[in-house]
Image (cartoon, grey):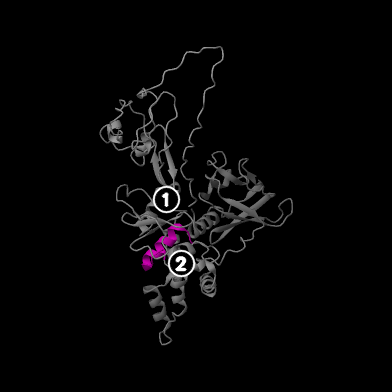
Amino acid sequence: MPEGPELHLASLYVNEACKGLVFAGCVEKSPVSRNPEVPFESSAYCISSSARGKELRLTLSPLPGAQPPQEPLALVFRFGMSGSFQLAPRDALPAHAHLRFYTAPPGPPLALCFVDIRRFGHWDLGGEWQPGRGPCVLLEYEQFRENVLRNLVDKVFDQPICEALLDQRFFNGIGNYLRAEILYRLRIPPFEKARKVLEELQQRRPSPELTLSQKIRAKLQNPDLLELCHSVPKEVVQLGGKGYGPEHGEEDFAAFRAWLQCYGVPGMSSLRDRRGRTIWFQGDPGPLAPKGGKSRKKKSKGAQQGPEHRLEVCLLPSFSPAPAAHPRSPPLTMEAMMGPHQPLNCSQNPLGTISSTRDPLVPSTAPSRTRGTRRDPPGQSTAQQPEGTSLQQDPEVPPVPGKGKRRRRPATSGHRRPRRIKADTPFLDNEGTAAS
């Protein structure tokens, strides 16, 4: 999900791309977007942008003499999971361009587009920042720090520090990858109580004997958590580009991937917090770690894949039907059915891939209710299939008849006894995708 640095970079991009451009006509919204229409039309106007935390404000300002006469209009955007701005030729608009601002002649026809593949992004008319959001960690550091330390009695600070860092009332601009990087640099367990971590900062005061340059040097060499909430996002902004995903260019993405020290890095552990968000860390998770939560380490295999890639579950390719198992034989393993192990290549899979932030698909544990097939003997149910597979009985494999099957009685009258139908056991659906 785009966080504070990405919104700031997007604002810089809009200002640079629209510098010197004149826009005209009405603002066009795609018919599939559920966001509000933008009632603005002008013969000549310019576009400027600013960002604050996880929000971006776009201002449409009519030029002198433009018709009809009207006041500037401001829109506030929240990018959701995949929002971004692109300047593109009018006759080659990018896919999922849900809001479009067109340039005026005589220059080349262009369009500034708000692109949102997943359609989680939103815009509001009026230009007001969303109420309840705290000061920006990037641009309003002093106000941000004061707002946190003044409100430590708030119940949000009873939560683990990794969860409190996502509360935009106090940490406006911090998101999933930033919290992991900040806590890792300070070696703070992610599930330590937030108030315990932050109360120590109230007593931290620099010595009055230090000069200004010595105080600055001490902060740079030994920053606290709130200082890193400001400096770590600045590092991402200094990387440049328009974002960190591969859709923004491999060069941008490679620089971001090299910058990461913890988030999605091989060797790091991960747990899901109470909101279902994955936190990456190293070492002890802390006393408030979820009960029963199992820490999983990032393996080095596939380390070249970026952390923004969600867990990819490849649909299994088709294979030849396996011979039917003997009623007393153990269930077939994946290797027995598919032969020697061959790594799956999702790019060659005609069925494509499934992106998910949840666990891989879990096979159904519902027993087959097909008439004429045997029921598995005790201890040999379909739940014993190898974990992580989604294999079902191949329809071309003939069922193995069970022993002692009752024969049908011949009908003695013109009326047939109605067949008893057993209700199917509901399929256990996999959990939905959590927002990043």
> Where is residue 137 shown, x and y percent of the image?
50, 66
* Highlighted magenta segment, given as a residue range: 174-191
Residue bearing the label numbered 1: 308
Binning the other alpha carbons within 10 Å of mark 1 as few (below 14), some (14 to 19) or many (20 upward) gives some
Residue 201 picture quarter: bottom left
Residue bearing the label numbered 2: 229
Residue depicted at 43% across the width and 82% down the height? 206
Residue depicted at 34% across the width and 55% down the height? 265
343 is within the stretch colored magenta: no
Q: Describe residue 4's horizontal placement relative to residue 311 as left or right.
A: right
Amino acid type of the residue tagged 1 in the rendering: Glu
* Separation (CA) of disc 1 from disc 2: 20 Å
**Residue at the outermost bottom position:** 209
Question: Quick one: 246 or 396, which is closer to the camera?
Answer: 396
> Where is residue 230 shown, x and y percent of the image?
46, 67
Binning the other alpha carbons within 10 Å of mark 2 as few (below 14), some (14 to 19) or many (20 upward) gives many
Question: Quick one: 65 or 286, which is closer to the camera?
Answer: 286
Question: Quick one: 259 or 325, which is closer to the camera?
Answer: 325
Can residue 139 be seen here? The reply is: no
- CB under 8 Å between callouts 1 and 2? no
> Where is residue 183 shown, x and y percent of the image?
40, 65
Rendered position, 111 above or below 154: above
Main SS class of the magenta portion in the image: helix
Q: Describe residue 322's horizontal placement relative to residue 279 as left or right.
A: left
Secondary structure found at label 1: loop
Residue depicted at 43% across the width and 68% down the height? 228
